[in-house]
Amino acid sequence: AIWKEYILCFETFELEGERHIVDQVWPVVVKLIRHAAAVDETTANKDDIEDNARIMMLTPRWIELVLGRLVSSDQIAVRKLGVFRLLQVLGRMPSRDDEGATAAKIAEAVKEMEEERRSMTVTQAKRDESININTADAGSASNKRSKKRKNNKEKQQPQPRKSTNSRNNSLEDVPLLLMTKMIPTESFWNILVPAFDSLGGSSVGYTIHLDENFQILTSSSSPKQIIREDMVPLFMQMVKNYMSIDVQAQSRMGTSFWNGFWDWNVIGNLSVKTIVDYIYCSVNENLSSETKIPTTNLDLQTMRQTL
C-alpha cells in the first residue's frame, strides 16, 4: 500500500499541471516521510534486515527522489509551489526543541509501522488458515455452510476505524530536522537551491499569493484576504539552518555544507542575486557566532571570477 501511495505522488508531481491538485497530495507525502523515517530508524543500527528483504523498503532516499521531481517540474507554477512548501518547513526559525520533536515524531512513526506490520501478519495468518480449512474440508458440505455463515457474520461486524489527526497529515507538523533527513546537504545544493534560483529568471518570481488559510488561489477562489509571501527570507533562513545543522552533525548528512558552498558546479549555474543572498546570510551567521569560514585561495578566486 505504501508503494502505491508513493507512485501516486510521483505521477502527480510528474504529470499534473494544476497547483491546487498538487497541493492535495501533501498529506500523502507527509505519510511517506513518516514511514521513511521509521524505516531509517529501525534499520540504521541493524546488520540483519532479512525479514524485510522480500519487499523493498521506503527509505529517505526515495523521499529525496520524489521531492526532487517536484521542484524540478517542467511546469514552472508547480515547481514554484513545491519550492515554497518545502521552504515553509526548511525555512523555519529553529527552536530548542527541534531534536526532541524530531525524535518524538520518529518514535511515533516507528510505532505506527510496527502496528501495521502486526496487522498484516495477522491478516496473512487468517488467509493461510482459510486456505488450510478449504483444503482439508473440501468434501464436507456442512463445514462449507458453517464457514460461509462465519464469513457473513464477520462481514456484518463493524470494522474498527483508525483515529485520524489532520495535523499529523500536515506539512507544518514535519519537524525541521526530520525534513533535512529527507533532503540532505548534497540535494540541498544540487537540486533545491537551483530550483529556487530558477524562479527569479521567470515570470513567476519569488512572491506567492495565498488566501487567508494559506491555500493556493484558484480561478474559483473568493478569498477574504490575499496574502503575499516573499520566498527570499525563507530561502536565506533555510541556508542558515543547513549550515548550522551540518556543523553540529559534523557532515553526517552527506556532502559538507561548505563543499557545496564553494562548488563551482553549483556557483556557475546560479544567478548573482542567489549567490549574494546565500553568501550574505552565511557570512553574517558566522560573524555573529564568531566562527571561521573554511575556505582556500582557490575558492575565493572562483567566487571573484563568478561575480
Image: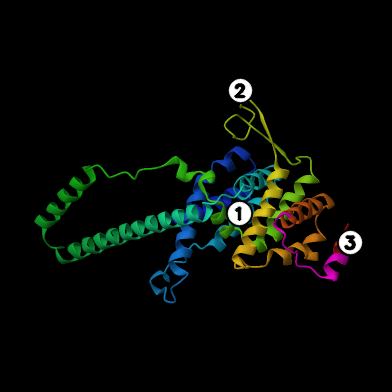
Amino acid of disc 2: Lys
282 or 201: which is nearer to us? Answer: 282
- State how far apart marks 3 and 1 are (Cα): 33 Å
Q: Where is residue 241 in the image (x, y as percent from the top left)?
A: 64, 54
Q: Is residue 298 magenta?
A: yes
Question: Mark on residue 304?
Answer: 3
Which residue, given by chain and number where applicable, does mark 1 sit on?
67
Which residue, given by chain and number where applicable, does mark 2 sit on?
224
Question: Mark on residue 110?
Answer: none
Dot 2 falls on a residue whose secondary structure is: loop
Foreground mark, 3 or 2, reads 3
88 or 249: which is nearer to us? Answer: 249
Q: Residue at x 66, y 51 (%)?
A: 238
Counting residues from the start of the chain, the first of labels 3 and 1 encountered is 1
Amino acid of disc 1: Leu
Q: Residue at x 84, y 52 (%)?
A: 272
Q: Residue furthest right?
A: 305
Instruction: Indicate the quadrant where residue 252 lies.
Output: bottom right
Q: Where is residue 263 in the image (x, y as percent from the top left)?
A: 77, 65
Counting residues from the start of the chain, the first of labels 1 and 2 encountered is 1
Q: Position of residue 193 (x, y in %)?
A: 72, 54
- State how far apart marks 1 and 2 are (Cα): 31 Å
Numbered range of the magenta stretch: 288-301
Dot 3 falls on a residue whose secondary structure is: helix
Counting residues from the start of the chain, the first of labels 3 and 2 encountered is 2
Q: Which residue lies furthest to the front in this view?
A: 290
Foreground mark, 1 or 2, reads 2
Amino acid of disc 3: Arg
